[in-house]
Structures are given as structure tokens and as C-alpha cells.
Amino acid sequence: MHLLETKNNAWGQSTPGLNLANLTAYLASKGQSLDLEFKPKRFSSGFGNMNFLIYMGGQPHVLRRPPLGPVPPGANDMAREYRILKHLHPVFPLAPRAHLFCGDTKVLGAPFFVMEYRPGLVIEAEIAPDTNGLWQGGDQIGGHLGRRIITVLSDLHAVDVNACGLGDLGRPAGFLGRTLRGWSKRAQLSWDKTPGDLRDLIGWLETYQPTEAISPTLIHNDFKLDNIILDPETLEPRTLIDWDMGTLGDPLYDLAVLLSYWTEAADPEVMHQLRQMPTARHGFPTREDAAALYSKVSGRELRDFTFFRVLATLRLAVVFQQLYRRYESGATDDPKFAAFDDLACGLLRFGLQVASGHHF
């Protein structure tokens, strides 16, 4: 996993996202000792939650908390994520074991939890040459990774939520309508002036919303390659992370969210600007082939799947617009965020192309 060293911080001082003195005192109150000879290190990937490598009792752990500044309503829910991991780990071992949750915002300024640390390889926008060169599989690296991604997603959707204590996690009845209304509302709040493409996209979704007939499953809600930590040698999954949006819902929506990040070589430029998954190269299957594989291994029909694809693309556009608004408001000074306004609008246009059948 990728780490950022914390700089110019001694124990007892604050580091962005952590108040080390408060953390030490809180953990001591829970019978845990923070190892003072190790400075915390921040994992560098992602635009959302903050993750730090810390040591307790001689063992590495991950402390996870929301990003600095205001967060959208319902997002970055640490209590929800902690609950999911506590119940899911025994029946779905790719979920890391959660150890401790703190809802007292006086400690770090936001709720947080501590979970086990599983080191490994995280693949983001590119596959490093040394990883590609060391690959010993019988096909291209993308073919292997594409199949494993889909298998993990299918395995997740096969979890018996009632047996593991997560049967009441969300409100699966009316999931699609509520999801569409929620992202439509967030969209209206994320743009000062509603773009015409946004009105058209929401109008299409409202017109073609299908009847909800599929039995709900546990869904991750942000399932993609860089949330799967891999064994560096075999490229087999070691753990699946980032569960703060997990809920009970339609598994086809989880598949559509994955495919919203899945760039193809012939896609318009906006999809390549995403830089989320290296699927345009390395022998990855196309979105359509990946969806067909999911249907085969899960046994689910891809009924009304264009609706799910368009809804997931709307979601992704809103997420990037929300990130842009954080930059605009001064909540972050990361220069990458400055381009997210154009990226979000481009995704709206791409969503309309998916709706019209020009792209899968």
C-alpha cells in the first residue's frame, strides 16, 4: 500500500487528521497502548477518508477517519463501516477485522475506528512496469485481474446477510428510487446552476427507472480495483477495504458502480481523465464482457442494466463535482481537484451517451 510519511511531527504534537496526544490518551482509556517509537504514516491513495498506519502493542493497525473539512450528508460514515466489518469479517474473510470504534469527536475532531493492517499491492491508475514484468500468469495481467475483480464482487453478493447479523443494515425496499432521488438531490446541491446535461440525465433516469424485483444483497457501493489489496506476487486479493457506504441494495448497482470506473481504449477523453483503473490496456475485458462474466458467475440476469449504468455514471459525476466544491471552498488545496468541475460535466455527457446506447 502507498504511504505518506508524516513530516516534522514528534509524538504529542498534532499531525493533519490526528491529534496524537488525544489519541494516546483515548487508547490508554481503552486498555491499548500506542507505541511511541513509531510515527503514524498516512496512506496516500484516494480522495476521501484518511487512513493512517499506527502501532499498538507492537502490531501495525490502520486508523481510519473522515477527510478534513465538511463532508456530504451520509458520507464517510465510520460507525456504519465499523459495524459492517465487525459482522462481515467472520463470513467474508476479505473484509479486514475491526478492533475499536470511537464516536467522540473531541478526540480527533471526527469519529474514527481502528482495524487490522494487511499490507499488499494497490493498483490505481497504472500498473507499474515491475508488476507487469514479474507477472507469471498464463495470460495478460488484465485478464487475470478482471476475472478476480468480478469473482470477488459475486462472492460478496452471495453473503447471507441475515446469518451474519447485517440483515437490518439498510432499507432495501425502494432502493433504486431512493438512490436516484438521493443522487439527484446531491447533484442539485453540487452545481450553482443546473447544467442542461444534468437535467436530461435525471429526466432519462426518472423515465426508465425499472420495477424493483431483484432480491437485495450486501453491496459495497464503491467497489473498484484500488479498494482491493493484492498479494504482490500472485495478484490474488488479500482484502477489500473502504466499506463506509456499504448497505443492502440491488447487486446490479454495485456492478454498475464498478463499471463506471472501467475505462476502455475507445472511450471519450473524459473517461481516460478519470484515471481510476488501468482497464484500457493490459488485456482487461471490456465493460460488456466483464458484465457478462458477472452474470455467468453470479447467475443473475442483467435486466434493465442500462439504467444502472446511467445511474452509476450520474453518481460518479456528482462525486467529482462535490470534490471540486471542496476545492472551491478552500477545504482542500490539492491542485488535482481544480479540474474536477470539467470532469464532472464530461461525465454527465458520457452518461447521456450510455443512455442512448453509444457506449455500454
Image: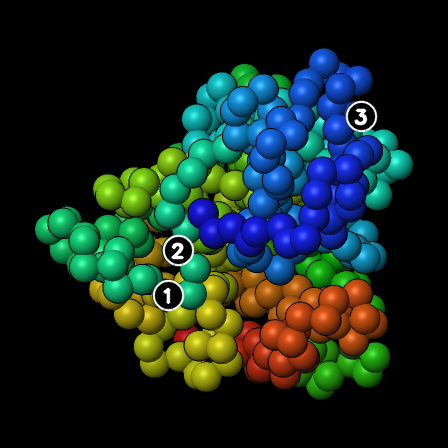
Instruction: Tell me the CA gap for discs 2 and 3.
Output: 36 Å
Closer to the camera, 66 or 197? Answer: 66
Image location of residue 116, percent across then percent down: 53, 28
- Report crowding for label 2: few under 14, some 14 to 19, many 20 or more residues within 10 A (C-alpha): many
Residue 197 horizontal/vertical position (percent): 66, 83
Of tags 2 and 3, the one toward the viewer is 3
Q: Is residue 271 above or below residue 313?
A: below
Query: Dot 1 surroundings within 10 Å: few (below 14), some, or many (20 or more)?
Result: few
| Viewer-side residue, 173 vs 50 | 50
Q: Is residue 201 above or below residue 161?
A: below
Q: Are marks 2 and 1 in contact (CB under 8 Å)?
A: yes
Q: Is residue 174 at least partly visible in the picture? A: no
Determine the CA span between mark 3 and mark 1: 41 Å
Pick whichever, 360 or 115, lies toward us. 115
Residue type pointed to by label 2:
Ile
Name the amino acid type tagged 3.
Ala
**Is 293 situated left or right of 107 in this image?**
left
> Of helix, strand and loop, which one carries label 3?
helix
Q: Which mark is residue 126?
A: 1
Picture coordinates of residue 137, whole percent (x, y): 14, 49
Q: Where is mark 3, residue-wise? A: 25
Vertical arrangement, residue 288 with respect to residue 152, above or below:
below
Task: Compare marks 2 and 3 and give the one earlier in the sequence.
Answer: 3
Q: Which mark is residue 123?
A: 2
Whether tag 2 and tag 3 are in contact, CB under 8 A, the answer is: no
Q: Position of residue 103 (x, y in %)?
A: 81, 31
